[in-house]
Amino acid sequence: MLVGEFGNGVIDVYDLSSGSLIDQMKDATGAVITNASMWDMVFGGGGSSGDPNTMYITAGLANEQHGVFAAITANAAAPPTGADFSIPLRRRARWSLSDKPRRFK
């Protein structure tokens, strides 16, 4: 089970059966993924609602005056011998409430 922390933006990974904390989600370098003031995280539903293997997150920055939209996908590297919760970050788009709407590819 993944639990995003609003205050510090860390995503905790829990064992669903025992409820025990396993680790925090990390990028491909082993650094803990942090998105300050995380608002939401959701997996895509397929089709136009996004890839079901991708987790999308949003976060507010600068006292909620700016925002971040990010997509997180599983690490495509060969699996290690032990548990691996590291994932690479994909492109991030930053936007401001004062910005004109833009289309990101």
Image: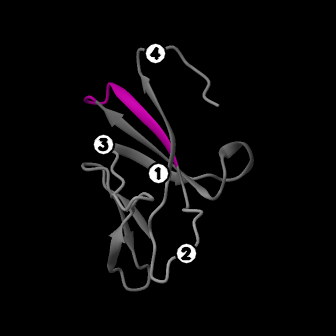
State which region is magenta. Answer: 62-71
**Along the viewing direction, whichever of 23 and 86 lies nearer the viewer:** 86
- Up-down relation of residue 14 to residue 86 (above or below): below
Q: Residue at x 41, y 79 (%)?
A: 15
For marks 2 and 4 on the same chain, the one whose residue lies earlier in the sequence: 2
Q: Which residue is mark 4?
A: 99
* Element on which disc 1 rests: strand
Query: Per the image, is 52 magenta?
Result: no
Disc with the residue nearer the chain's start (1 vs 2): 1
Which residue matches tag 3? 37
Q: Quadrant of the N terminus?
A: bottom left
Mark 4 residue element: loop
Q: In terms of sequence position, does the residue under pointer 3 or pointer 4 come before the other?
A: 3
Is residue 16 or residue 83 the one in the foreground?
A: 83
Percent from the top left, x then y, of residue 95? 44, 25
Q: Which residue is mark 1?
A: 41
Estimate the x, y position of residue 85 in percent, counting from the top left.
Answer: 44, 69
Which circle's residue, 2 or 3, is located before the other in the chain? 3
- The quadrant where residue 29 appears: bottom left
Q: Are marks 1 and 2 in contact (CB under 8 Å)?
A: no
Mark 3 neighbour class, 10 Å CA radius: few under 14, some 14 to 19, many 20 or more: many
